[in-house]
C-alpha cells in the first residue's frame, strides 16, 4: 500500500491538497457519491437518500461548479485537458474508496451528508471548505496509524524476528559434457595445480560438469597471491639408486627375528 507523503509544510500530499474553490466543492460531491455507493451497512442506510437530496438541492450550483472546473483544466493543460481531468477524478474516487479507511469514512460522510441539507446552509462553497477537511482528517488518522504500525513492526522484527539465513549456492554444468569438455576442464585444472604456473593476476573461469539440466555456469575464482601459493613439491629422481628411509628397509614381519644363513633366527 502506498501512503501519500507529507510535504515540507507538514501537509500530506493527497488528492485533496492545494485545491481551488470549485475543486473543493466537486471533491465533496465525489466523496458523498462514493459513500452512497459503498457504505451499505444498516447504520449508514441514510447516505443514499441524503446524497440524492444533496444533488437536487444544489443542482444549479453543482452545474456551475462543473463548468468552472472544465475551464480551469483547459486553461492549465491546453487541448489535452480532458485526459488530465479524467485521470485526476479517477484518483479522487479511488482515494475515497480506500478499503482500510472505509469504516471511519462512512461515519463522517453520513454526518456531513445530513449537515449539507440543513436549512441554514446557504453557501455550498463555504460549507464544502469546512466539510472536506473533516473527511480528509479521517484518512489522515488512518495514514498515521498505518505508518506507526510499520515502524513498530520493523522494530519488533529487528529485536525478535529471525535472522537472515546465510545462503550458499552451488553451480553445476550440463549433464551432457563430452570428452572434449572433460579434457579441457582437466587441462585447465592442471594448469592451476601446485606443479603448474604461478597464479595469474586475472580471474579464472571454470566450467564444472554436473548432473542438472541447466546451461553451464561460469564460476569466478579469486586468484591466490604468490605469497600464499603452495610451493611445488620436489620431483622424484628418474635415474640412479633410490634410497629409501631407514624405517622402510625392514620387510614386514622382520620384527619377529633376523634371517641367518637362510633360516630365521630364534628370537630371544
Image (cartoon, rainbow, N blue to C red):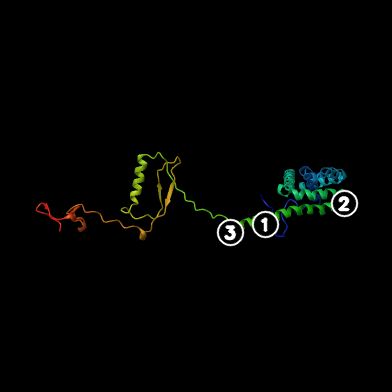
* Mark 1 in CB contact with mark 2 (< 8 angstroms): no
**Horizontal and vertical percent position of residue 63:** 84, 44
Question: What residue is shown at x 82% (from left), y 54% (from top)?
Answer: 130
How far is the residue under mark 2 from the one under mark 3?
55 Å
Compare marks 3 and 1 and give the one earlier in the sequence: 1
What mark, if any, has residue 235 been given in the picture?
none
Q: Residue furthest right?
A: 119
Compare marks 2 and 3 and give the one earlier in the sequence: 2
Q: Secondary structure at mark 3?
A: helix
Closest to the observer, 189 or 241: 241
Q: Which residue is mark 1?
A: 148
Q: Residue 258 falls in which quadrant of the image?
A: bottom left
Q: Which residue is mark 2?
A: 123
Closest to the observer, 204 or 99: 99
Q: Residues within 10 Å of mark 3 (few under 14, many from 20)?
A: few
Q: Secondary structure at mark 1?
A: helix
Q: Which of the two marks, 3 or 1, is nearer to us in this view?
A: 3
**Horizontal and vertical percent position of residue 129:** 82, 53
Q: Which of the two marks, 2 or 3, is nearer to us in this view?
A: 3
Q: Which residue is mark 3?
A: 159
Compare marks 1 and 2 and give the one earlier in the sequence: 2
**Horizontal and vertical percent position of residue 193:** 33, 52
**Horizontal and vertical percent position of residue 214:** 46, 41
Amino acid at each position: 500500500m502506498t501512503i501519500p507523503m507529507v510535504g515540507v509544510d507538514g501537509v500530506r500530499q493527497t488528492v485533496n491538497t492545494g485545491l481551488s474553490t470549485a475543486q473543493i466543492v466537486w471533491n465533496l460531491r465525489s466523496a458523498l457519491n462514493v459513500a452512497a455507493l459503498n457504505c451499505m451497512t444498516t447504520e449508514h442506510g441514510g447516505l443514499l437518500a441524503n446524497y440524492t437530496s444533496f444533488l437536487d438541492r444544489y443542482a444549479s450550483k453543482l452545474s456551475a461548479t462543473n463548468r468552472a472546473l472544465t475551464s480551469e483544466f483547459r486553461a492549465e493543460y491546453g487541448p489535452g485537458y480532458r485526459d488530465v481531468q479524467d485521470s485526476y477524478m479517477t484518483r479522487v474516487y479511488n482515494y475515497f474508496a480506500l478499503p482500510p479507511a472505509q469504516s471511519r469514512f462512512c461515519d463522517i460522510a453520513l454526518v456531513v451528508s445530513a449537515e449539507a441539507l440543513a436549512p441554514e446552509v446557504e453557501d455550498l462553497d463555504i460549507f464544502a471548505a469546512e466539510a472536506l477537511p473533516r473527511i480528509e482528517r479521517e484518512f489522515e488518522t488512518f495514514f498515521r496509524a498505518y505508518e506507526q504500525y510499520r515502524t513498530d513492526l520493523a522494530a519488533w522484527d529487528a529485536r525478535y524476528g529471525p535472522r537472515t539465513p546465510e545462503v550458499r549456492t552451488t553451480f553445476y554444468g550440463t549433464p551432457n559434457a563430452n570428452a572434449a569438455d572433460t579434457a579441457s576442464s582437466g587441462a585447465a585444472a592442471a594448469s592451476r595445480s601446485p606443479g603448474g604456473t604461478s597464479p595469474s593476476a586475472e580471474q579464472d573461469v571454470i566450467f564444472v560438469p554436473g548432473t542438472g539440466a541447466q546451461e553451464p555456469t561460469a564460476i569466478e575464482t579469486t586468484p591466490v597471491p604468490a605469497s600464499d601459493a603452495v610451493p611445488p613439491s620436489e620431483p622424484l629422481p628418474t635415474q640412479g639408486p633410490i634410497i629409501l628411509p631407514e624405517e622402510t628397509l625392514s620387510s614386514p614381519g622382520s620384527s619377529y627375528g633376523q634371517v641367518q644363513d637362510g633360516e630365521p633366527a630364534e628370537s630371544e
